Amino acid sequence: MNIYEQMHSGNLYDPGDPELMNEQFQYLELLHQFNTLGPTEFEKRNALLKQMFAEIGEGCFITAPFYANWGGHHVHFGKGVYCNFGLTMVDDTHIYVGDYTEFGPNVTVATAGHPILPELRGEHPLQFNVPVRIGRNCWIGSGAIILPGVSIGDNTVIGAGSVVTRDIPADVVAAGNPCQVLRPIGERDRTYYFKDKKIER
């Protein structure tokens, strides 16, 4: 198994491998360029995102600054994904995001972890990576943290400040640390969009 296969296998590997770091820095250069563009330089932004990301659908918008360990190289976006400022994607392995999902400010999605045993984290630290999957039409609230290996189902809302340590099903509102399901999305949500604020049709 070569170093790239190790990185995506879930096994422990050396993230400081020179071959890996040489490629990683190439994508970080693209990320730096993206973050220095003006807010109305739409064509340049979109062209860079197509170079940076593994996949990016039509109509996606990412507000700078955007942070990613591999510059988005292992990130797969569907269409119409919106990301507010300060999104961090620790994309040492793959992150999948479905169509029309929205991220509030300062969300972190992490695929990388380190062993608990100090000897494996010290002078020559090892790492492991597990993919994250976020469904379609999700809303990830401000400051949420999504940890390695988590899957979030379609249409689900993750409350602001949540720490998502385990899978969350589709069609629910979930929040907290650790994040847990509060309730299903239901009939009341068809009438009220916020507290007692009614949806006018």
Image (cartoon, rainbow, N blue to C red):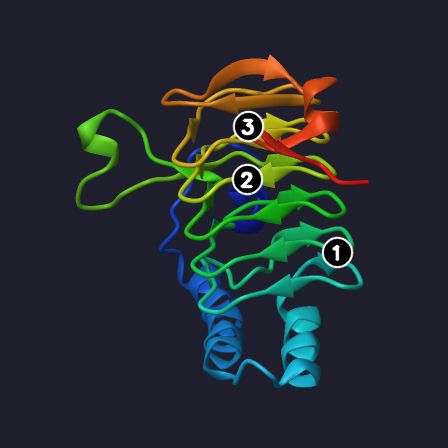
Residue at 47% in and 55% down: 87
Q: At label 1, which amino acid type do we have?
A: Gly
Residue 129 % position (x, y): 49, 38
Q: At label 2, which amino acid type do we have?
A: Ile
Mark 1 or mark 3, whichever is nearer to me: 1
Instruction: Indicate the quadrant where residue 137 lies.
Output: top right
Left/right of residue 190 with respect to residue 2 in the rendered view: right
- Asked if the residue at tag 3 contacts the one at tag 1, i.e. Cβ–Cβ closer than 8 Å, the answer is no
Of labels 1 and 3, earlier in sequence is 1
Image quarter in which the C terminus is found: top right
Residue at 59% in and 44% down: 5
Image quarter in which the N terminus is found: top right
Residue underneath mark 3: 150
Distance of mark 2 from mark 3, alpha carbons? 13 Å
Q: At label 3, which amino acid type do we have?
A: Val
Of labels 2 and 3, earlier in sequence is 2
- Asked if the residue at tag 1 contacts the one at tag 2, i.e. Cβ–Cβ closer than 8 Å, the answer is no
Q: Which mark is on residue 80?
A: 1
Left/right of residue 37 with respect to residue 12 in the rendered view: right
